[in-house]
């Protein structure tokens, strides 16, 4: 519970959300550029681009922004090349952390990632030091509607080729083989389901419990990585408590 005014809390959250949204659009724009470079600007012939567009739409990125990013990457302005780099290391308390980045300056990004690890009580590790603890999975999150039958949604997902299924009070989480992500997502959309997110993620084989002090430091580290434009995704195996709702 917050001791502040509800409206003040909403205002702070909205400001943070607006800033986060701009940051997300920047990151997705880079993913779109890399996808276009790899397979061309036509999503019908470029599955990677098709997945990126779906991710952009799920993040409420305006269609004009999406098309602008695609045109920029496929035209004369698309001369900036982004390298895909994965960093592995340990957060406070020995938590396993994977950082995925797209960068046009490897030295800058490596220095920034190392600085964040060090500042938050962790350390940058060597290649493959923690990646073996994670498995790549396609994950589709869909909205849970009033009156939904969990078993019915699960059967729909499995029929489309999903591997696993879970749910919360407001969402369904459907995991797939990464190669089946597009098929499952498109099938759910055709069935009238609202896609909240759709992407390949690194899922830890198991999670580790952390104390309050370690959790605070891990959350700080995650926030710092999120604020870095070069960092696309961060994965960890810490079992963090759900954020409390604020009134």
Image: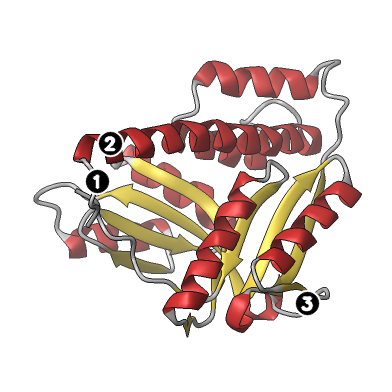
Please indicate whether residue 238 sits to the left or right of residue 85 in the image: left
| Residue that extends furthest to the left in the rendered view of this protein | 147
**Mark 2 highlights which residue?**
8
In the rendered image, residue 134, in percent from the top left (x then y), is placed at 61, 75
Comparing labels 2 and 3, the label whose residue is closer to the camera: 2
Q: Is residue 96 left or right of residue 108?
A: left
Work out whether mark 3 precedes mark 1 in sequence or the reverse, and give the earlier one. Answer: 1
Between circles 3 and 1, the one closer to the viewer is 1
SS at mark 3?
loop
Judged left or right of residue 31, residue 157 is left
Please provide percent x and percent y for residue 186: 43, 42
Circle 1 residue: 4
Task: Give me the C-alpha separation between circle 3 and circle 1.
Answer: 45 Å
Other residues around mark 3 within 10 Å, as few (<14) / some (14–19) / many (≥20) = few
First reached walking from the N terminus: tag 2 or tag 3? 2
Residue at (63, 30) in percent of width and height: 43
Spatial CA span between label 1 and label 2: 7 Å
Distance (Cα) linking label 2 and label 3 = 45 Å
Nearest to the observer: residue 92 or residue 78: 92
Residue hosting label 3: 128
Q: Position of residue 91 (x, y in %)?
A: 63, 73
Q: Residues within 10 Å of mark 2 (few under 14, many from 20)?
A: few
**Residue 64 or residue 225, whichever sits in front:** 225
């Amino acid at each position: 519970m917050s001791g502040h005014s509800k409206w003040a809390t909403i205002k702070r959250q909205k400001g943070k959300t607006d800033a986060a949204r701009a940051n997300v659009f920047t990151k997705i724009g880079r993913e779109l550029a890399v996808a276009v470079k790899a397979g061309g600007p036509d999503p019908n012939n470029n599955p990677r681009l098709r997945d990126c567009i779906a991710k952009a739409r799920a993040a409420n990125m305006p269609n004009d922004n999406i098309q602008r990013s695609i045109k920029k990457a496929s035209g004369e302005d698309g001369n900036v090349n982004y390298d895909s780099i994965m960093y592995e290391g340990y957060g406070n308390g020995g938590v396993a952390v994977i950082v995925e980045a797209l960068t046009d300056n490897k030295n800058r990004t490596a220095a920034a990632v190392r600085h964040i690890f060090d500042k938050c009580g962790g350390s940058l590790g060597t290649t493959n030091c923690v990646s073996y603890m994670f498995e790549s999975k396609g994950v589709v999150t869909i909205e849970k509607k009033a009156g939904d039958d969990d078993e019915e949604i699960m059967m729909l997902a499995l029929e489309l080729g999903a591997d696993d299924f879970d749910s919360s009070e407001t969402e369904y989480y459907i995991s797939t083989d990464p190669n089946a992500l597009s098929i499952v997502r498109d099938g759910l959309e055709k069935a009238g389901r609202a896609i909240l997110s759709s992407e390949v993620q690194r899922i830890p084989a198991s999670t580790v419990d952390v104390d309050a002090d370690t959790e605070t430091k891990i959350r700080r580290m995650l926030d710092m990585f999120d604020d870095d434009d070069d960092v696309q995704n961060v994965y960890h195996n810490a079992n963090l408590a759900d954020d409390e709702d604020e009134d």
